[in-house]
């Protein structure tokens, strides 16, 4: 058994999803998630992808992510919009509320702590 893990989407079937209907603002976004790691302490790591659309987000968890491709806009309630493109990284902390809008299909890798 190796203690190193490579994120290879071709090695795992993605989970398919979408925003909850009561959070949808516009479009018909669809999600694909490759969750490669579930570790002690409520830590998850993987790759997430979404097609264009906009929905409300509420974070109870801590998340770091890095945009691998695409263009999204994350806006905190009462705050400025942050445009995220390939190469950008962000942390969303517990209590974050706002919206996520995918302008161009976006893929990110992530580490989440619940």
Image (spheres, rainbow, N blue to C red):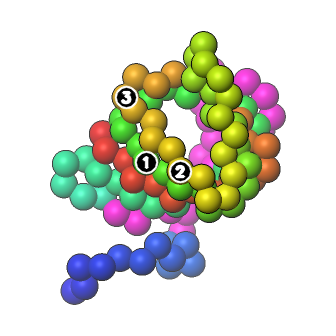
* Residue drawn 80% across the image and 34% down it: 27
Q: Earlier in the sequence, mark 3 or mark 2?
A: 2
Q: Check the picture and name the quadrant holding the C terminus.
A: top left
Residue 22 within the magenta-colored segment of the rendering: yes
Dots 2, 1 in contact, CB < 8 A: yes
* Residue drawn 43% across the image and 48% down it: 64
Q: In the image, which disc is placed on residue 89?
A: 2
Q: Which residue is mark 3?
A: 94
Dots 3, 2 in contact, CB < 8 A: no
Secondary structure, mark 3, is loop
Secondary structure, mark 1, is strand
Q: CA distance from mark 2 to mark 1?
A: 7 Å
Residue range in magenta is: 13-37
Residue 97 vs 105, above or below: the answer is: above
Q: Which residue is mark 1?
A: 64
Q: Earlier in the sequence, mark 1 or mark 3?
A: 1
Q: Position of residue 49 (x, y in %)?
A: 63, 55
């Amino acid at each position: 058994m190796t203690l190193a893990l490579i994120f290879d989407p071709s090695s795992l079937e993605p989970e398919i999803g979408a925003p909850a209907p009561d959070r949808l603002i516009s479009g018909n976004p669809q999600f694909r998630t490759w969750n490669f790691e579930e570790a002690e302490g409520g830590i998850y790591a993987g790759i997430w992808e979404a097609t264009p659309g906009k929905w409300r987000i509420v974070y109870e968890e801590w998340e770091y992510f890095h945009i691998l491709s695409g263009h999204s806009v994350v806006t905190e309630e009462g705050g400025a919009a942050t445009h995220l493109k390939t190469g950008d990284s962000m942390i969303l902390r517990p209590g974050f509320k706002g919206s996520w809008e995918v302008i161009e299909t976006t893929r990110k890798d992530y580490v989440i702590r619940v």
